[in-house]
Amino acid sequence: MQNFEEMDPKTILRSYYGYDSFRANQEEIINTVLHHQDCLVLMPTGGGKSICYQIPAIVMQGTAVVISPLISLMKDQVESLKANGIGAAALHSGNDFNKDTIVRRKCMDGTLKLLYISPEKLLTEIPFLLKQMTISLFAIDEAHCISQWGHDFRPEYTQLDILHKEFPDVPIMALTATADKITRQDIIKQLQLKNPQVFISSFDRPNLSLTVKRGFASKEKDHYIFNFITARPFESGIVYCLSRKTTEKVAKFLISKNIRCAVYHAGLSQQERDKAQLDFQRDDIQVMCATIAFGMGIDKSNVRWVIHYNMPKSIESFYQEIGRAGRDGAPADTVLFYSLADVVQLSQFAKESGQKDINLDKLRQMQNYAESNVCRRRILLNYFGERRDHDCNNCDVCENPPRRFDGTEYIQMALSAVKRADETIRTSTIVEILKGIASPTVKRKGYEQMKTFGVGKSLSTNDWQDYLLQMLQMGFIEIAYDQDNIVKITESGYDILYGRKRAELCVIDHSVKEAAKPKRRLHLEIPTITIPGLPKTTGVEDKQLFQALRDLRRQCAEEEGFPPYIVFSDKVLHSLATIKPVTLEAFGFIQGIGEHKKQKYGQRFVAVIQKFV
């Protein structure tokens, strides 16, 4: 085995990962661990967290123990490390006895640089395997799971304070992509970290476009998603849904349109979930329709878009889920559908949870993002304590600022219906009264006799629901979740109802529901490099070459049993199709291609490039 301990971090970064420089904070984090200091690393999904513990693990004597919550995540990381020529393995319930025995031997004789293990397995192995190993460091991934303030609390994480008790001299690195200030403090306390260095990287993911679509009915969502996908025929994506039933419905619709699609939710057997995930990772399917059960195990770098069919329960959840797109740094799209029904349902869930006040507050923050009329990226960054003094120009608000009109009359119509019904009706009944729909509820209560019955029949049901949503966000009405979701008029609402003040509403853009055209892509920056013997290129990507390289990548992956993105990321393929290196030496200069992969795949990829050049 190569003596990694004689190599410095920058040499390893170039030789094994194919990059010439570290991203922000990475080098400082690595040096902190090399000096045997504890640290807490807060870095966005796709920001390069794994390198922060993998390189120290490679440099330091012994084996790094990486605590990870999901088998699929461990498997993905181990395959990626092996593909780069680095010794790694995992201990989990999916292994058989023989495989576990082999892994244990490698740990004890020091031939593994990284051992991935679940929290449950770790606790059982501390008195036995871990005591017989030379442990270089502990890396706790998804560390927000240890805190009850976090968005994905897991009880099995709470016993990890045992690590410093049993291994007082081994440094601990806690890593997470989403944690507010309270959660960060709790992670440090729960793990009993010793004077930890705290590193908070920028949460900005400029390669992700941010779009919110408000007030779409189910059929309109389906229509939009179908057009969105067909405009991106070779791009992998995820559709997140609030319920199992919805995931099944959306998947059935897409399959009926001949889109390669699978379903993932907690109601399926483990075998069914594993197959769906493997098919997605290997590009055998294009789209995954999933609940949040399809979560932290996703390390697929070439996911090009994420759509939320329903609004998530918090900004932390939303940020982590959209973060599964564009992990390779290439442009990716995110779309969030948002409706009044989502607000009501999620508020009910929050009210019934064990942390009502916290969860309602998190939901309100999510609503603020969805309803915002200012740059969405600024709102996201502000939530995580990062100030931005300029707009992003890569969100729907920046690209198409909302138009407004004096909506006082419409607001008064709605408020009048609520008032005349003695503030005892739900939003659905408000719409029925305004539209003049004689539903069973309307007839039973005699609401068809109201002066406001049918006063708003010129507007569609969807438009009224949208305006009610805007009224809720502006504070003119509130929903009494503890009184069967009936609507109440607020003090500021009464100001509008009685004509003391006027108010504006946002114009509803009906045209966007017709079709989802591909968004303007951000320019993918290909680093300027000097390659000896390589003629200057036009800097223009050859689309046909990219597809040929994509086909070769898939062939290599199938031969080795890896997902294609583990061979090379989409961003590497874009670079190859732009720079077009025609020698093995030039091939090795491409960012993201290390020495190991250069020798392993270089000749085959160069041969394809030569045919096009």
Image (cartoon, grey):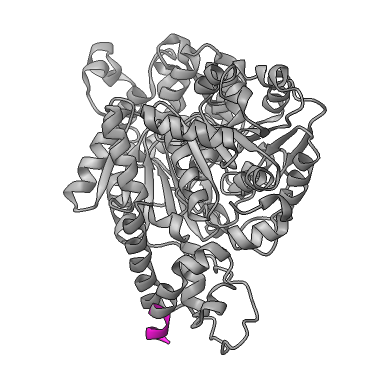
- Counting from the top left corner in percent of width and height, residue 153 is at 55, 21
Q: Identify the residue at horizontal 63%, vertical 56% (top origin).
A: 392
Q: Residue at x 20, y 41 (%)?
A: 252
- Position of the C terminus by quadrant: bottom left
Where is residue 530 shown, x and y percent of the image? 65, 81
* Magenta extent: 608-613
Closer-to-camera residue (440/293): 293
The answer to whether residue 457 is visible is no
Q: Residue at x 70, y 57 (%)?
A: 22
In this rendering, is residue 453 above or below 24? above
Residue 193 lies left or right of residue 433; in this view the side is right
Q: In the rendered view, tell whether residue 558 sits above or below residue 245.
A: below
Q: Main secondary structure of the magenta part?
A: helix
The quarter holding residue 95 reads top left
Q: Residue at x 38, y 19 (%)?
A: 426
* Residue 204 lies in the magenta stretch: no
Q: Given the current orientation, which residue lies at the most extreme left position?
A: 256
Tell how many labels: 0
Quadrant of the rendered image containing residue 607: bottom left
Give the camera-side residue of 145 and 230: 145
In x, y percent, where is residue 508? 43, 48
